[in-house]
Image (spheres, helix red, strand yellow):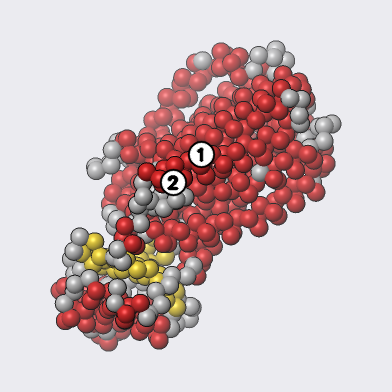
């Protein structure tokens, strides 16, 4: 690059990403927290009302619930990740087809699971639990859960696609209604109508159904990007591609089910049903831990999916670093909470065995668990599904169960497996990425990103504050880049003018609130691409090139006259291959190909 461009600071800070990610983080964490109230409420209320046998029955029934999660997450996360990539490639029609495809397959799979499960319920209950006192309770709980398969699988559709549409608050409300509704119905069915284990299962199904219905009402609203419908397949996207994208979420639930069964067996042999009941309480609190370790990466999944579609390595790196910075304080806060409340939690579950050491081991494992979840989430959306599945297999099933087996054989405290499973997974990942990078020199060591564009100087990323002097500086950066990549001087002048006036127009429309820009300019196979992503109200400055009256819904009518003042935007129309606007994860995006 020339001295001119090297003298200009081409720095992308994380202010824009921090704001966009911050809007999604708390709602996503609250969504997972609210959803896991189902497990906590069933555990505490059943333990207090019905005793340890009923509590153990719920834990033995957990694999069936996880199988439903496997089905829902496999279909919906696979289509949603592909939809995010389609949005990153500016193919909103394909994203809508993928959404409709997820609805169809969720309904079909739900019908098959319900019919097959209810026909085989007796041998299924015997497989889950062989104890005569507990097995009938397991069959009762599993039967109601299978009857409510449809909402438990279908709820994944609004959970994923509302977030993809940038409507994280509605996801939070949806999950909060499910969690609080489950608690209220548990109180009603267990304490008022005395319905036993059947009532606990019914409360979970009804609360999930209400939440699912509300989620679809919001998802199918007037401003939604995903109108209700069904289709069997999406053109241009194979079932294999969807399966690869959905496999990490599904495998996480699959291995969780195997883990519960494996840990239950080992603990039953080591300490009897009392230790299994204690693990039920620990597992419930572990589900709340996922509000941090799972919520932090899930809040970034839609953004990372879009960045992956755009091959934007720098933004992905900043977003991954932001996840670590945001997640560690929440890990520490959660750890302090469970350690201080260990005795209360044990009493709430009606347990005589103390849980303090178990929660201490869980606390040690939280930061490694956060790192593992962030890595598996990143690998999933960036096309390295095998890496994501390997991390999930190790951290969820192989390392915890292997550690617990060794600890039990050595007569050590079994709760150490909550830490060793996560730490050993990170160690294996560290070694494996070093070996992989040795044979793939173009990839970065840990994130396996292709660095070709960056190393050849064919891409720049930088951030711009919403000030006129910064906008002028940004325009000069784009000018130098275009000159260095073979654009004619006359074209460079027109692009520079258009970019400067476009950002000035955006700033004028958002005078009452601060605007921040994230810009990416790249040259690939003779085509120069410019992406401008900005905060603020929903507003499309390109509608002046598409004809008046097509302004975005968020733009006030009084701004319409601004188009006559900014002729530079129209000048770019004759020289671009494509110029498009879209709203992604609650932010505005303009993509221009020259």
Q: In the image shown, does 424 or 556 lie closer to the viewer?
A: 424
Viewed as shown, does residue 73 lie left or right of 479?
right
Residue at image location 46% in from the left, 32% down from the top: 71
Residue at image location 52% in from the left, 34% down from the top: 393
Which residue bears the numbered disc 1?
391
Q: Position of residue 328 (x, y in %)?
A: 63, 55
Q: Residues within 10 Å of mark 2 (few under 14, many from 20)?
A: many
Per the model, the C-alpha gap separating discs 1 and 2 is 10 Å
Q: Position of residue 546 (x, y in %)?
A: 22, 71
Secondary structure state at the residue bearing disc 2: helix
Q: In the image shown, does 273 or 211 lie closer to the viewer?
A: 273
Q: Are marks 1 and 2 in contact (CB under 8 Å)?
A: yes
Viewed as shown, does residue 367 lie left or right of 76?
right
142 above or below 227? above
Q: Position of residue 341 (x, y in %)?
A: 79, 46
Tell me if I can see residue 34 in this picture.
no
Q: Earlier in the sequence, mark 1 or mark 2?
A: 2
Which quadrant is the C terminus positioned in?
A: bottom left
């Amino acid at each position: 690059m020339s001295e001119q461009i090297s003298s200009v600071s081409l720095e992308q800070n994380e202010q824009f990403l921090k704001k966009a990610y911050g809007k999604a983080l708390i709602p996503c964490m609250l969504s997972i927290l609210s959803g896991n109230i189902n497990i906590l409420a069933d555990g505490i209320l059943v333990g207090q009302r019905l005793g340890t046998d009923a509590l153990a029955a719920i834990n033995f029934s957990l694999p069936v619930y996880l199988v439903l999660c496997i089905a829902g997450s496999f279909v919906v996360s696979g289509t949603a990740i592909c939809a995010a990539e389609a949005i990153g490639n500016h193919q909103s029609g394909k994203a809508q087809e993928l959404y409709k495809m997820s609805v169809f397959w969720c309904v079909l799979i739900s019908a098959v699971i319900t019919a097959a499960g209810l026909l085989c319920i007796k041998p299924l209950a015997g497989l889950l639990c062989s104890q005569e006192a507990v097995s009938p309770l397991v069959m009762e709980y599993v039967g109601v859960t299978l009857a409510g398969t449809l909402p438990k699988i279908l709820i994944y559709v609004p959970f994923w696609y509302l977030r993809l549409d940038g409507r994280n608050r509605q996801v939070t409300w949806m999950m909060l209604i499910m969690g609080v509704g489950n608690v209220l119905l548990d109180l009603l069915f267990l304490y008022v109508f005395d319905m036993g284990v059947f009532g606990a299962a019914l409360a979970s199904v009804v609360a999930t159904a209400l939440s699912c219905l509300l989620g679809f009402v919001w998802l199918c609203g007037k401003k939604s990007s995903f109108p209700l419908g069904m289709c069997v397949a999406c053109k241009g996207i194979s079932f294999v591609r969807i399966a690869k994208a959905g496999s990490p979420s599904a495998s996480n639930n699959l291995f969780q089910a195997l883990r519960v069964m494996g840990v239950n067996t080992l603990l039953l042999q080591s300490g009897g049903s009392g230790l299994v009941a204690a693990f039920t309480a620990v597992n419930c609190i572990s589900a709340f831990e996922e509000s941090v370790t799972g919520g932090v990466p899930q809040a970034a999944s839609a953004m990372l999916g879009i960045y992956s579609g755009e091959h934007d390595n720098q933004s992905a790196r900043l977003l991954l670093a932001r996840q670590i910075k945001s997640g560690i304080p929440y890990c520490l806060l959660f750890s302090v909470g469970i350690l201080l409340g260990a005795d209360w939690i044990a009493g709430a579950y009606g347990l005589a065995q103390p849980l303090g050491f178990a929660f201490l081991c869980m606390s040690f494992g939280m930061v490694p668990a956060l790192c593992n979840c962030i890595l598996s989430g990143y690998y999933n959306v960036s096309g390295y599904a095998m890496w994501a599945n390997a991390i999930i297999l190790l951290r969820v099933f192989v390392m915890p169960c292997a550690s617990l087996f060794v600890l039990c054989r050595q007569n050590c405290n079994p709760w150490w497996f909550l830490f060793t499973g996560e730490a050993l997974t990170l160690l294996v990942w560290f070694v494996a990425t070093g070996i992989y990078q040795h044979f793939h020199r173009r990839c970065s060591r840990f994130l396996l990103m292709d660095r070709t564009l960056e190393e050849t100087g064919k891409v720049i990323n930088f951030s711009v504050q919403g000030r006129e002097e910064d906008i002028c500086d940004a325009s000069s950066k784009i000018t130098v880049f275009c000159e260095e990549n073979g654009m004619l001087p006359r074209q460079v002048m027109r692009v520079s003018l258009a970019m400067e006036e476009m950002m000035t127009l955006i700033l004028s429309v958002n005078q009452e609130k601060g605007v921040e820009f994230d810009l990416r300019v790249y040259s690939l196979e003779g085509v120069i691409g410019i992406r401008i992503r900005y905060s603020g109200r929903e507003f499309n400055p390109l509608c002046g090139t598409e004809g008046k009256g097509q302004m975005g819904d968020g733009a006030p009518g009084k701004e319409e006259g601004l188009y006559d003042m900014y002729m530079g935007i129209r000048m770019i129309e004759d020289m671009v291959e494509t110029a498009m606007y879209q709203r992604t994860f609650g932010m505005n995006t303009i993509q221009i190909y020259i």
